[in-house]
Each structure stands twice: as C-alpha cells, then as structure tokens.
Image (cartoon, rainbow, N blue to C red):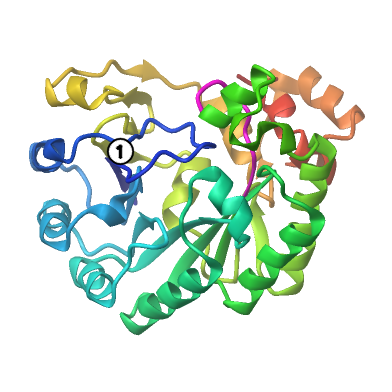
Amino acid sequence: MPGVYISYPFCAQKCTYCNFASGVFPLALEPGYLEAVRNEIRNTAWAWTPETIYLGGGTPSLIEPGALSPVLSAIPGDWQEATMEAAPGGMTSEKAIAWRRAGINRVSLGVQSFNTRELARTGRKHTAEVVKHEIAMLRAAGIGNFNIDLIAGLPGQTLESWNHSLDWVVSLNAPHVSVYMLEVDEDSRLGAEVMAFGKRYGAPDIPSDDMIADFYEIAVGRLAHAGIARYEISNFARPGFESRHNLKYWRRESYLGFGADAHSFDGVSRWQNPESIDDYLRGSKPERTPADPTAERLFLGLRLTKGIAGDWSPFQSAIERRIKDGLLETDGNVLRLTSRGVLLSNEVFAEFV
C-alpha cells in the first residue's frame, strides 16, 4: 500500500552540515503553513488508504501537540507505521505521550554524534545523556520503535570518537540506525566552506574520504555484531524494524507528499511541491514528470542490500563494466552492489540516470 510524506521545514537552528530545504523561519508562518498542509491533504481524492506516514523536515518535533493532531487526523486509514523526525533536546514526557495518542508509533532521532565537541561544532545542543533520557521517555510513552541517525565525517571526528558513538548506539539497544557519510556540497554551510577552502565550521578538520569510508565499514561490522543488520546503504535494523515507509522509495511504491518541497510518485509520474514556503502558500502547482521505470528500478533498488532481480539488458554494457570494476556482482538474475560498490555507489548509479 502507498505512503504519505509530510514536510515541515521549520527548524530551531540550521545545522552546518544540513543541505535540506529547511531553515529558521518566522514562527508566525507556522499556523498558516500547517493549515495549508491540512487543506492540501483534505482536498486529496484518496484512491487508496495510506499504510505509512512519515513526518520529516526540518524539525517536526517542534510542532505543538495541539497543532499536530489536526494535520494527522486529516489522513485516512489505520496506519501500520507513522514516523516523526525529532531533534534531541526538546522532548518532554507530555510531548511523547501526545505523539503516541496522535498516531505516531516511530520516531527518528537526529542524534548525528554522541560526542559533545562534535555536536557543538555542527550547531547541535544535545548530549549523549539527553538522548538516553529522551529514548526512555519514548519507551515509557509506548514508542519503542525508534531510529538513531549518525553522520560519519563530522569535523574533528576520530576513530575513538566514532567508536564512542557506536558504543552508545549499542548500549541503547536501538532497533534501527541510519549511518550517513558526510555530503560536501554547496547547499550546506559546511559544504560550501569546504569547497571554498575556508576555515569556518571546522571545515579543515573534516576527516579524509578514506577515513570516512573506514568509519562506515566499522559501523557495518559493529552494528551487525549487535544484531542490527544493514538492509540499505545507509540503513540498519533489527529483524522486523526496517522502515516500512522508506522501503517504498527504494521499491518504487507509490506515495503522496504534502507541504513545501514534498515529492510524490504514483507509479507512473513524479512531481514536487514548490520548495519555498511562500511559493507553496501561494498555491503554485507542480509539474509532473514521467518516470523511467527500468533506470529507477536499478539506481533505487540497488540501494537495498539484497539487490534486485530482473532483465537489465538495456544497461548490459554499463553493468558488465561495473562488474569488471568490482562495484557490482550477480547471483543468477540478482544484481547487487559489492562492499566496495556501496562506498562508490554514486558512481554506479550515475550509469543509470
């Protein structure tokens, strides 16, 4: 069954590494924005009942419970999974209970690191103990399904500090973990500083590409040893705790996006709402773009650890080249990334875009 994505682009502060369409916007915009999202949902002709919901951002955990319920209640169905992203440091027991009552049964915590110095240099204000305390709140509220985000490659990160963060993840018995290798591009303050050879935001102290790759592979091994297996390039889970919603993206299943910059896919076409809040509130209409099913199945499905099966003859020469390079491997009609291919996945996917 399809899923629903809701975009909440508001943040309390903009982290230096963030390249999302989010920011510190005037809170006076929030009531009108949430009402516009609710109206967009209510004006949708539902041809199916949503199975999953994902509330991302931004920092959706900033939404007051009284404002959250009307938005979620506009979505039909009895959802199997309803995820909300949260920034550690602002949770209360009352909020966690209200989230559960509103239908949220999974929370994705943007921890990024358990090292105080690394967090401070990126603009985050929480500590490892705060994360521990808030996870206890979630569990007490009946939300035992949660994700911990980590970033490999933060300024000043070392082998010791990386293992320290992994120690915390294991000790907290996390059911799901996301490990992202730092992206350096002009869409984040840190990335732009690195590209300009500047010194702000700890840019000179970003670990080398080889070290970041080592951090990632260490995480793969340590999490697997703890029973948290990789099922997608950046995502690891205990059995049964894989993200149902995110799997829809990689399996090319349908989903509808609501809010600024939200994307949608109906199995045939893709479209995206206006990126800016102002354009979204003005009601600008997105244009639909036909999807390329064969290419998409490759560069989306190859993200999954188990690989993908099918007839890939349109891309046979590219696939054979990448097999020869040691980035892809086959097992019968199943195609998958090798361990080295995972680290160089963007090079592989570029063949199919």
Residue at position x 69%, y 51% in the image: 305
Depth check, front residue: 113 or 249: 113
Residue 149 rendering spot, x and y as whole percentages: 54, 55
Q: What stretch is highlighted in magenta?
A: 179-188
Q: Tell me, yes or no, if residue 2 can be seen here.
A: no
Q: Quadrant of residue 309?
A: top right
Where residue 167 sits: x, y (%)?
Answer: 69, 71
Residue in the picture at 38% in, 26% down: 268
Q: Is mark 1 on a helix, strand or loop?
A: loop
Label 1 crowding class (10 Å Cα cut-off): few <14, some 14-19, many 20+? many
* Vertical relation: 44 (above or below) 118: above
Residue 63: x, y in percent?
21, 54
Is residue 273 in sight in this rendering? yes
Disc 1 residue type? Answer: Pro
Disc 1 target residue: 9
State which quadrant residue 199 falls in: top right
Front-lying residue, 93 or 335 = 93
For residue 238: magenta? no
Task: Find the residue positioned furthest to the front.
Answer: 199
Viewer-proximal residue among 27 and 245: 27
Quarter placement of the C terminus: top right
Query: Measured along the vertical axis of the image, is residue 344 above or below residue 320?
Result: below
Judge from the rendering whether residue 95 lies leftward or rightward of residue 136; answer left or right: left
Q: Does residue 348 appear left or right of residue 353 in this picture?
A: right
Q: In this view, does 350 lie above or below 328?
A: above
Residue in the image at 62% along x and 33% along y: 183
